[in-house]
Amino acid sequence: MRIWAVANQKGGVGKTTTVVALGGLLASAGKRVLLIDLDPHGSLTSYFRLNPDDIEQSVFQLFQHQGEVPQTLPRQLIQPTGWPRLDLMPASTLLATLERQAINQGGAGLVISKTLAWLWDDYDFVLMDTPPILGVLLINALAACQYLLLPVQTEFLALKGLERMMRTLQMVMKSQKRELPYCVIPTMFDRRTQASVGSLRQLRQTYEGQIWPAAIGVDTKLRDASRAGLPPNAYDSGSRGVKAYASLLKYLLTQETTEVRRQLVP
């Protein structure tokens, strides 16, 4: 099982689209993929036509066992997306109440790690969509993942959100005493605007060596796929956005393999 978290401490930068697009491409390539929605807003859950406001079986149930996860529970929470080999563990808006509960729970930051241990042989890839705030849900994602994807819109305010995310990442790596490989992914790039071009240039200068060399451009077909409740490659496999995400996926698989090999070399 390979576990990727998609995170940024700013909303609206393309986290959910990135999760669904990469998940759809992996499933189409024959991989068994689980998408996990860790955001109380439930955008990933809503994408697949489930309602986070009234769903009864969700990620929230994992956090109701004093930091432990019953072996049979994770499989009970998984929902089909309607797309072959692509499953979803949905979110509930009740996740917004977890911060108060977690104060009195030991091991609350490792719930997702324990959950995935029970599912280890069921999936080839797990992709997690995370909330844009630092709390128990984001900490769970960072503790569980092997590779961190950081989508960032190519505009000034999104760059500031990425700076906050990087500070969080450094804090988590220090507390966990481990390196967490990551990749910055420029999104919503519009070459027609100076703001977008300038932001992309700044990203490449600041995160040299840790940034995908290309960018996900603005593409209305990605929004149309969301409206249809389909992975983008199922909606229009020839769209610019799908081709960009396919290129990104190829890059990520190569980078992840290289990083794992680097960590194994003494």
Image: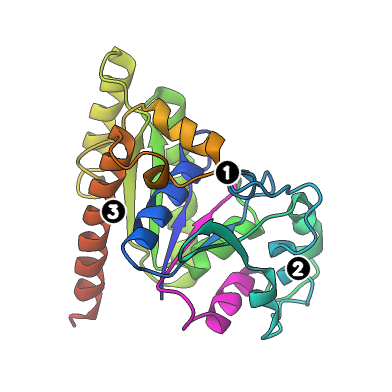
Residue 130 inside the magenta-drawn segment: yes
Q: Amino acid at mark 3?
A: Leu
The kind of secondary structure element at disc 2 is: helix
Q: Position of residue 103 (x, y in %)?
A: 77, 64
Residue lying at 31% horizontally and 51% vertically, measured from the top left = 183
Q: Amino acid at mark 2?
A: Gln
For label 1, the residue is 132
Front tag of 1 and 3: 3
Q: CA distance from mark 1 to mark 3?
A: 23 Å
Graded by Cα atoms within 10 Å as few (under 14), some (14 to 19) or many (20 or more), the crowding at tag 3 reads some
Which quadrant: the C terminus? bottom left
Q: Quadrant of residue 119?
A: bottom right
Residue 7 inside the magenta-drawn segment: no
195 sits to left or right of 223: left
For label 2, the residue is 61
Graded by Cα atoms within 10 Å as few (under 14), some (14 to 19) or many (20 or more), the crowding at tag 1 reads some
State which tag comes first along the sequence, 3 or 2.
2
Q: Position of residue 66 (x, y in %)?
A: 78, 77
Q: Quadrant of residue 228?
A: top right
For label 3, the residue is 249
Q: Quadrant of residue 90?
A: bottom right
Quick check: 135 above or below 112?
above
Quick check: 176 above or below 252?
below
> Start and end of the magenta stretch?
109-131
The kind of secondary structure element at disc 1 is: loop
Q: CA distance from mark 2 to mark 1?
A: 21 Å
Q: Amino acid at mark 1?
A: Pro
